Image (cartoon, grey):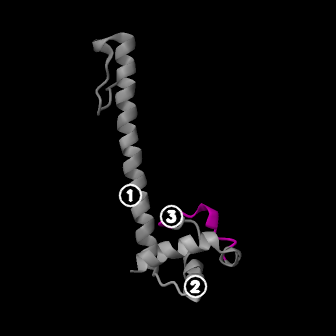
Amino acid sequence: MSQRSLEAFIAQARLDPALQQQLDDCSVEQWGDTHLPLDIDARKVMAVAAAHGFEFSFNDVVRAQCQKLSEFWRFEMENSFVARRSLSLIQYQISGPAGVAPNYGYLSS
């Protein structure tokens, strides 16, 4: 599959100094294991990859980026719920039950 080709190319680019030199303005050191950063020239990366026998489309690049952003969003949302619950527990310890904020809502002003 072309998504696997993208992942294989990312792994190869991290190990191959010649590829890194060809991609010197594409921040190879910041690439994820399964995706490319949003702020690089994806078409240049695809051209270099194709020259080295890797085949993936712009659609594959965008799909991988969107998947990573979706995972990041879910991670951040889960952390926000944990943080809010932890804050409620701290408030409870300080002020007792009357001062506890709702776990998944906002206090009205």
State which region is magenta: 23-35
Residue on which the image places disc 1: 70
Count the marks: 3
The type of residue carrying mark 3 is Asp
Q: Quadrant of residue 64?
A: bottom left
Q: Residue at x 57, y 85 (%)?
A: 47
Q: Is residue 14 left or right of residue 91?
A: right
Of the image marks 3 and 1, the number of the one nearer the N terminus: 3
Disc 3 element: loop
| CA distance for labels 3 and 2 | 19 Å
Across and down, in percent, residue 93 comes to 37, 14
Which callout, 3 or 2, points to the residue nearer the camera? 3
Disc with the residue nearer the chain's start (2 vs 1): 2
SS at badge 2: helix
Q: In the rendered structure, which disc, 3 or 2, sits on the residue that comes first in sequence?
A: 3
Q: Do the numbered discs 2 and 1 sit on residues whose CB atoms are within 8 Å?
A: no
Residue plotted at (65% across, 75% down): 16
Disc 2 from disc 1: Cα separation: 27 Å
**Residue 13 % position (x, y):** 60, 73
Residue occupied by mark 2: 47
Name the residue rendered at 61%, 69% in the picture: 14
